[in-house]
Image (cartoon, rainbow, N blue to C red):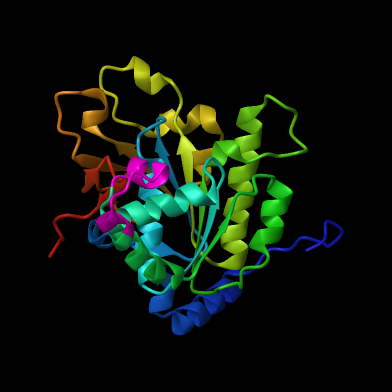
Amino acid sequence: MSLLDDPKFISTADAVVLFEKRLEAQDERDFVPTGFTSHDQTLGRLRRGEIAFVGGRPGMSKTAFLLAMALNQLKAGLDVFFFSLEMSIAIIMARLVSIETGIRLLDVIERRLDEYEIQKIIGALPKLSSLKGDWSTDALLPRMEKLFKQIKPRSNAVVYVDFLGMIESPDIRPGDAYAATTQAAMTLKRFAMQWEIPVVAAAQLNRQVEMRKDKHPILSDFRDSGRLEEAGDIVLGLYRPGYYDKSDPDKTLEVLCLKNKNGPMKDYLLAWDGPCAHAWEQAKLS
């Protein structure tokens, strides 16, 4: 679409025809399960053309949550495209190995392993290698857009970005984090709509959270991070009680629904294993 083209409206009649065609063509592939039954049955599965933002303060398991969801989808046969902008691919793979083997992440990274653990890792690697994942550490927005264009539109794919604050926008003046994050979020939203695939992006919440007695995230905590609360179709906030309360066993990750444009607003709980940086659903919904 060129800026020189004359803009035009679509009539209601034409819009209804488009809806009817989409309804007839729609199938289960248009709804992407997260692998967390609590999410899929209450908030709905991920949908084509929509973007979900996952927010939390530093150390609140944003990467772990995205990786757990992505791993669920990889095992279900989906194509996952994962932008890791604050961790190397080697560390991301170490996290997947820790999840799959149950060996402490730090021990995997520093290779503090006994013979049994080494054999366990060797046994897990072929299974991980067979998964249909593609990984990138490119943080420059124009380069990310070029990588987006390598993904087939309306394909059986999901894109993850970890995290928005690390995306570099060359046409935004240095230091204007709000404008840079806003541009990145809007670019990802347009990509999700044009390519008709779901996008999930992590975001850092502002410092106001730390000043409140109740540190559960709320939608306005995204405000200083760019126009994420406006652009997001689904906005989730992550909270671990054990992160702040050291007497808590830190075995629970709360996933709070702060916005769900086309569905209900419901929260759910995941089990949390800190040493392996792993979130999973311990109790399945009926």
In percent of width and height, residue 190 lies at: 62, 55
Q: Classify residue 248 by image quadrant.
A: top left
Q: Quadrant where the C terminus lies?
A: bottom left
In the image, what residue occupies the spot 57% across and 53% down? 189
Q: Nearer the viewer, residue 276 or 231?
A: 276
Q: Nearer the viewer, residue 107 or 131?
A: 107
**Residue 261 appearing in the image:** no
Q: Does residue 205 lie above or below 93 as drawn?
A: above
In percent of width and height, residue 191 lies at: 62, 58
Q: Nearer the viewer, residue 264 or 157?
A: 157
**Residue 142 appearing in the image:** yes
Q: Does residue 10 lie above or below 171 as drawn?
A: below
Image-based side of 247 in relation to 30, left or right: left
Q: Nearer the viewer, residue 277 or 173?
A: 277
In the image, what residue occupies the spot 57% across and 44% down? 85
Q: Is residue 117 magenta?
A: yes
